[in-house]
Image: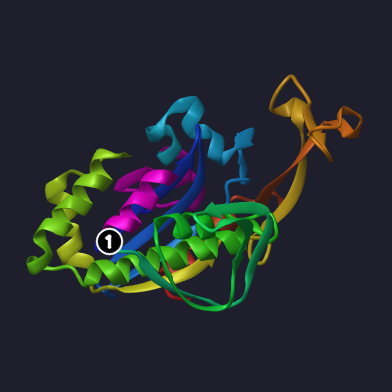
Amino acid sequence: MVDEPGNFNILVMGKHGSNVDTMIFTNINSETREVTMLSIPRDLFYKGRKINSVYAEYGIEEQVRWVEDIVGYKIHNYILIDMYVFRDIVDLMGGVDITLEEDLVDPTYKTCDEDGCSTLYYAAGEHHLNGTEALRIARSRHTTSDYSRAERQQLILEGIKKKAMGLGIGDADTLLSLISTVLESTETDIDTDDAIRYYFRYQNFELNRGYVLSSANVLDAVPVAVAYITSHPIKTCLDETKPETCTDSFAIDTLMPAGGNWGLIRDYVAQILAGE
């Protein structure tokens, strides 16, 4: 496992319910003054299970160890945040600004506010998002790929970073409130003193985002028998209200490195961090 001097790695995770839905391996390079983010898809199938199910079964430390094994790099700290706490953090910061490169439309995602309910839709272009809106964009995935969702999540994190850069000594109360909210509402091995130190040390580092493990680089889609994971089939329905449309599924779609060669992922991560 690689543990390079001058490099500091954090695993940033988001969960909704018992499973981890978001995993971002984050490398901080003190020499190049860069922060590089690599999203790991939740459907990655490793050691007989989807990677996002490890936390619920074995706990946070084992989740971190599995990701270390996959990427080949030591993870020095971790933070696991509930999606609804993420919403509160964005609101506490006064919202975030992002730019969508293309329209986001998700007819399966219904949004409701004081003006009524509608389909999730955000046009391409600039947006100022409150916490609820940021959460919607981060979670929508049914009409785009999971990789596109990962890229949007990184885009929102970039917006949070830019907003945080505007906080300084003059915003000490907001900064402390923000850090306290994060640390008190998450699972992390970072304490308040370390969080403040990281903020002032790394806030001006350049952010490299957009890296996602996917079939565009080193992964293949591989159907796996459900019996390999559980003793019961998974029931899928075209219409939940009509039992006649339901069937038992005995395979699920997963992702694995091409040819089952896990070294491909480690080599890919090494190339990214080397700037290649």
On whether residue 90 falls in the magenta region, the answer is yes
Q: Which residue is mark 1?
A: 93
Pick the residue in front: 211 or 111: 111
Q: Residues within 10 Å of mark 1 (few under 14, many from 20)?
A: some
Helix, strand or loop at label 1? It is loop
Query: Residue 146, how many percent across, how many down?
Result: 63, 56
Q: Residue at x 46, y 41 (%)?
A: 15
Report whether 111 appears left or right of 272: right
Q: Residue at x 59, y 58 (%)?
A: 264
**Range of the magenta residues?**
65-93
Q: Residue at x 58, y 51 (%)?
A: 41
Report whether 222 appears left or right of 62: right
Q: Is residue 1 visible?
A: no
Identified by mark 1, the residue type is Met
Which image quarter: residue 216? bottom right
Report whether 61 appears left or right of 54: left
Q: Is residue 226 visible?
A: yes
Considering every residue shown, the one lying at the far right of the view is 244
Query: Residue 154, how many percent across, how many down?
Result: 46, 64
Which image quarter: residue 106? bottom right
Pick the residue in front: 211 or 183: 183
On whether residue 167 falls in the magenta region, the answer is no
Considering every residue shown, the one lying at the far front of the view is 115
Query: Residue 255, how many percent across, how many down?
Result: 67, 49
Query: Residue 3, how many percent across, how many down?
Result: 32, 53
